[in-house]
Image (cartoon, rainbow, N blue to C red):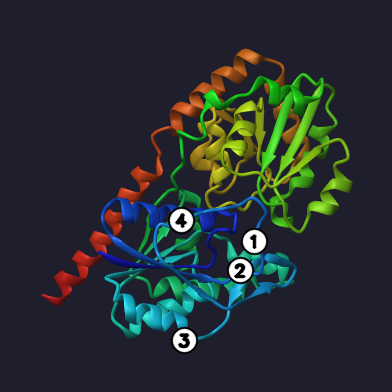
Amino acid sequence: MRVVIVTESFPPDVNGVARCALETARHLVRRGHDPLVVAPLGGHDPAGVTVESPCPVVRVPSVPLPGYPQVRIALPGRRLAAALDEHRPDVVHLASPFVLGARAMAAAARRRVPAIAVYQTDMGRYARTYLGGGGATAWRRIRTVHGAAARTLAPSSAALLDLSEHGVPRVHLWPRGVDSARFHPGRRDAVLRSSLAAGRELLVGYVGRLAPEKDVRLLAETSRLPGVRTVVIGDGPSAAGLRAALPEARFLGRRTGDELARIYASLDIFVHTGPYETFCQTVQEAMASGVPVVAPRAGGPLDLVDHGRTGLLVTPGDGGAVRDAVRLLGRSAELRVRYGTAARTAVEDRTWEAVGDQLLGHYEAVLAGRTAVAA
């Protein structure tokens, strides 16, 4: 099968869209298919991030999103159309389509090639946060782009419901995979943990973008708990402000690969604060690492965290609720071990290979449907 993956982000970018697009390309190659990636040309190269693509990548010119230069907006041009004409895909895979993906949807329709749109980013929230409004406009664009797709794939039941309520048709569930060999409890490093905890009894961590929609400021009360060391892993436009707002926390910057896996596994509790996650891959990586999770009772974490068994779900936007959940888990090492073990068991089989095969099933269903209509 020939597939063109059109993505709004691709490595060396470090985010969920880039990671999922890369893993999709890898799986297609593993299964003997022929993918091509089309992605924006980045304006930066994150230090220490080296990722070899499993297939050819066509880069199109782009400009930074106002207020968040790590996000790139592709510019119009002929490279996308030329890539489609040269590769002659059976299916066009649109990863978080919005700008480049919208143009790819139109180009695929002109060529009568079916497109599958993968919903990953709450663009309505992005519009409100970074452009000062336009949430309704963003949803109109989402309906237009996804409405033209043969099938839209939502990463969680909350995202599926959101799309359906906003009038997007033909929505199916497709979750995200996790590298359960890399993110593993066996990566726990006593020396690293001791260094990060710096004499505190409990090590609590957040991993992710440092951006307004992530609400990392909610860790303030947690970071002031006696005996607790809070570490923040990631980078983004809110980094400087958060360092000032969370003086008790330790900021480690962006970490990747095996180093990140060791940090995850060395935590006692993982906390995610953002309420707008369509999936929340960092929660899944923490669970694979055998770490109990505290997360908002909203969005993707609703599918991932089994409250009272693998972690605790709290009221979104409530820093006191986050603090109280951390304090509850902090009182009992036995409870943390029990939750962490259950968390690992819950996600260890959700590998990229398993979800990649599910994706191929979606491709095949779309192609079979077109064949049946043509007949």
Per the image, label 2 sits on a secondary structure element best described as loop
How far apart are the alpha carbons under marks 1 and 4? 16 Å
Going from the N terminus, do you reach mark 1 or mark 4 first? Answer: 4
Label 3 and label 2: CA atoms lie apart by 18 Å
Callout 1 amino acid: Asp
Which labelled disc corresponds to residue 45?
A: 1
Q: Which residue is mark 3?
A: 78
- Please determine whether, in this image, residue 253 is positioned above or below residue 200: below
Secondary structure under the numbered disc 1 in the rendered image: loop
Horizontal and vertical percent for residue 302? 53, 41
Q: Give the SS element for disc 3.
A: loop
Front disc: 3 or 1: 1
What amino acid is at disc 3?
A: Arg
Neighbour class for label 2 at 10 Å: few (<14), some, many (≥20)? many
Q: Residue at x 33, y 82 (%)?
A: 85
- In the rendered structure, are the residues bearing label 4 and label 2 in contact, judged by CB atoms less than 8 Å apart? no
Query: Closer to the camera, 288 or 182?
Result: 182
Q: Amino acid at mark 2?
A: Gly
Question: In which quarter of the view is residue 295 placed?
Answer: top right
Q: Earlier in the sequence, mark 4 or mark 2?
A: 4
What amino acid is found at the position of numbered circle 4 in the picture? Leu
User: Can residue 309 be seen here?
Assistant: no
| Mark 4, residue position | 22
- Quadrant for the C terminus in the image: bottom left
Q: Is residue 327 above or below residue 257?
A: above
Q: Callout 3: few (<14), some (14-19), or many (20+) C-alpha neighbours within 10 Å?
A: few
